Image: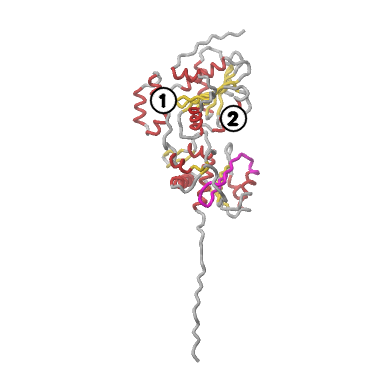
Amino acid sequence: MLTIEYDRPPVTTYQRDIMDCAERFAVVEASTKAGKTASMIIWLFEQALQGRDGQEFWWVAPIYGQAEIAFSRMKRQVTVHGFFVENQTALSLTLPMGSKIVFKSADKPDNLYGSDVYAAVFDEFTRAKEESWYALRSTLTATRGKCKFIGNVRGRGWGYKLAQRAKNSGDGEYTYFKITAWDAVEAGILEKAEVEQAKRDLPEHVFRELYLAEPSDDGGNPFGLRFLEQARLPQLAPGPAICYGVDLAKSVDYTVIIGLNGSGQICYFDRFKLDWSLTRNIVAELPDLPTCIDSTGVGDPIVEELQRSRKQTEGFKFSSTSKQQLVEGLVLAIQQGKTGYPANTPLEDELFSFAFEYTRTGIRYEAPQGLHDDCVMAYALAWNKFRTKPTPVHSTASIRFVPIKTPRL
């Protein structure tokens, strides 16, 4: 019979509280460099030590490179030579009793379905796609496995909502932890002078998110969170639509169709993943109203084909300049209260997580790495068509009777 002697490495009080909490799902919003990754590597290793032959334990990160970093750190933290059977290609480590720790990328959520997972860590969950959590959750169903969510605060997308649920749940399934840089200073992980220097070096909203685990009011969001909250509608606005914006799927993305009514409010919303033939048919069946479709790259022939039967359809080619202008048009509309969107939709999550940054060539607008912006771009295309629609001309014919003078005879 195999016997393994194990002593847990030293951890701080808050690390131990997170590792040993009884709740099934622990959501941790933490300062950068506060030791969350190191402690969760220990926790996942301990879970796998209690596993049996063939059982899987997952570390899920937003992209492959981050999963690879955790894979390397796990190998370094276990110093017993030959303890793991390593598979670099699959990013997996098999323990002597046959249980396996697998490091996964959340970039393609469909690749996460199928397995039975006995415990998981979702690393940097605030920077990953919400669909990845849906997939990961399905793998924990049969096993009733636990999951630890760890990450920095980033805007108010799905990760923020999950943290709020955990904070206010009280159902025994979820629990919440907040670790600030000052907690890490007190625990001896960070130096006070370094945190104070970071506060001087960084914009306030960046420091608050990265070091204090506080969502900023706006941060890098071009719309402004206050304006997004004001533009939120309880549901789809009443129709009919007078124009549409369509963002066509590319690779793992979604096709999104958004329709605006005469007041500029979203009254039609559809989001799906289908092959090009079915996608084309769905768009073709929309009423032949003014429609703006992303025609960049593979979208160009689709748009050309649709234009044969749809007389009011136009293509829009994205470039760094045209995308900037398109997004800024939507930003202005939202901030001026000219349009509104339905709450509790993927669009709402994308709007709250959308970001911009300054580059040497100008401003770049995009979703954070690993997230979608399909809904936002469809919204921007719809608004572009709405604001450029022809202004109706109301003409009234004026008739004037001019008396004809009969000449005297």
Would you say residue 347 sits in the magenta stretch?
no
Query: On screen, 82 above or below 105?
Result: above
Q: Residue furthest front?
A: 170
Tag shown at residue 394 = none
Residue at 51% across, 59% down: 392
Q: Residues within 10 Å of mark 1 (few under 14, many from 20)?
A: many
Amino acid type assigned to the residue bearing label 1 in the image? Thr
Would you say residue 273 sits in the magenta stretch?
yes
Cα–Cα gap, marks 1 and 2: 30 Å
Q: How many numbered marks are there?
A: 2
First to last magenta residue range: 257-278
Q: Residue furthest bottom?
A: 409
Q: Quadrant of residue 46?
A: top right
Query: On screen, 11 above or below 159?
Result: above
- Expressed as whole percent of the image width and height from the top left, the position of residue 305 reads 62, 50
Q: Residues within 10 Å of mark 2 (few under 14, many from 20)?
A: some
Q: As rendered, which of 111 and 332 lies closer to the eye?
A: 332
Q: Which residue is mark 2?
A: 135
- Expressed as whole percent of the image width and height from the top left, the position of residue 60 reads 54, 26
- Expressed as whole percent of the image width and height from the top left, the position of residue 383 reads 51, 48
- Expressed as whole percent of the image width and height from the top left, the position of residue 34 reads 43, 23
Q: Is residue 231 visible?
A: yes
Query: On screen, 300 above or below 6?
Result: below
Under circle 1, the secondary element is loop
Q: Is residue 329 left or right of residue 85?
A: left
Q: As rendered, which of 23 and 359 lies closer to the eye?
A: 23
Under circle 2, the secondary element is helix
Tag shown at residue 180 = 1
Disc 1 to disc 2: CB gap under 8 Å: no
Q: Which of the image's four quarters has the N terminus?
A: top right
Q: Is residue 67 visible?
A: no
Amino acid type assigned to the residue bearing label 2 in the image? Ala
